[in-house]
Amino acid sequence: MKTKKKMSNVTYYSVMKNDSLIQPWTKSSREIVQTLKRDSQGILISLKGDSKVSLDDLIDIGKLSIYDQQTMDQFMNEKTCGDVYLDNAFTLIDDLEMKYGVKDSKYSFEIYLATALAKKMQISQKLSWILMTAFIATQSSKLADLVLDYPGDDWKQFDNSFFDKLLEKPYDPPFVEQGKHYVTYFKSELFEYNLVAKAFQDLNELRKINNNRLTLNKLQNQHSYELIRMSFELLKYFS
């Protein structure tokens, strides 16, 4: 009995502005990211389907996804009193200054980008704190203890283990056949933790926008695709 071959997927990307494509369909991340960096009004478009199907046919039958780009100005203008994600961010900024003498601008890229992604994902306050502090710790391991300053009362021993696991190098996502990602962290029932594991890997991928090494198909969370422009703006503003 012959076994059925699995479909091999391919993803094309483009950029849309004013309801028109301003970038030809391409599999190249570099071209797309450069366009999004140049144009603050650009919207990322992806087209996914069977690699055996021609691009012309894929346009008709493939899966189309649209990712509006959040800008730094939009994010900053959203700051409102009582926002648990921003409260987390401001608490962390205060801790950095008071306990480590670190000026708030030094890790603003990590703090604000992680906050933006956590807010889009609507994860818990605790996991938002873990995501921010882990992202900062990739830049300075001595700051890993910041995670213990979590202001909530729902911290568990498992959270310590999860945080330590996040910081095991490499931070790149693992791969299986056909470029699909899988999670090596914990069991599937820990759904929100698995989301944070992927988000942490995505943040480290988004950081690569600074030297044009960002690879779009390595991003695992749909909201990460919405933060490409903001990643560039944060790096430019706080560097």
Image: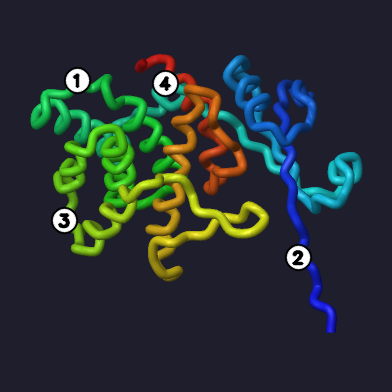
Mark 2 near mark 3, Cβ–Cβ under 8 Å? Answer: no
Badge 3 or badge 1: first in the primary sequence? 1
Instruction: Give the amino acid at mark 3.
Output: Asp
Q: Residue at x 53, y 42 (%)?
A: 223
Q: Earlier in the sequence, mark 2 or mark 4?
A: 2
Q: Nearer the viewer, mark 3 or mark 4?
A: 4
How busy is the neighbourhood of tag 1: few (under 14 within 10 Å), some, or many (20 plus)? few
The residue singled out by tag 2 in the image is 6
Question: Do labels 2 and 4 touch, CB within 8 Å?
Answer: no
Q: Which residue is mark 1?
A: 103
First of labels 1, 2 by sequence position: 2
User: Which residue does the numbered mark 3 point to in the structure image?
Assistant: 153
Question: Mark 3 or 4 closer to N-term?
Answer: 3
Label pair 3/1, CB-CB below 8 angstroms: no
Between disc 2 and disc 4, the foreground one is: 2
Q: Position of residue 73 (x, y in %)?
A: 45, 19
Would you identify the image quadrant in which residue 175 lies? bottom right
| Residue at 75% over, 32% down | 26
- Pick the residue in front: 52 or 84: 52
Distance, label 1 to label 4, CA atoms, is 16 Å
Mark 2 packing: few (<14 Cα in 10 Å), some, or many (20+)?
few
| Contact between labelled residues 2 and 1, with CB atoms less than 8 Å apart | no
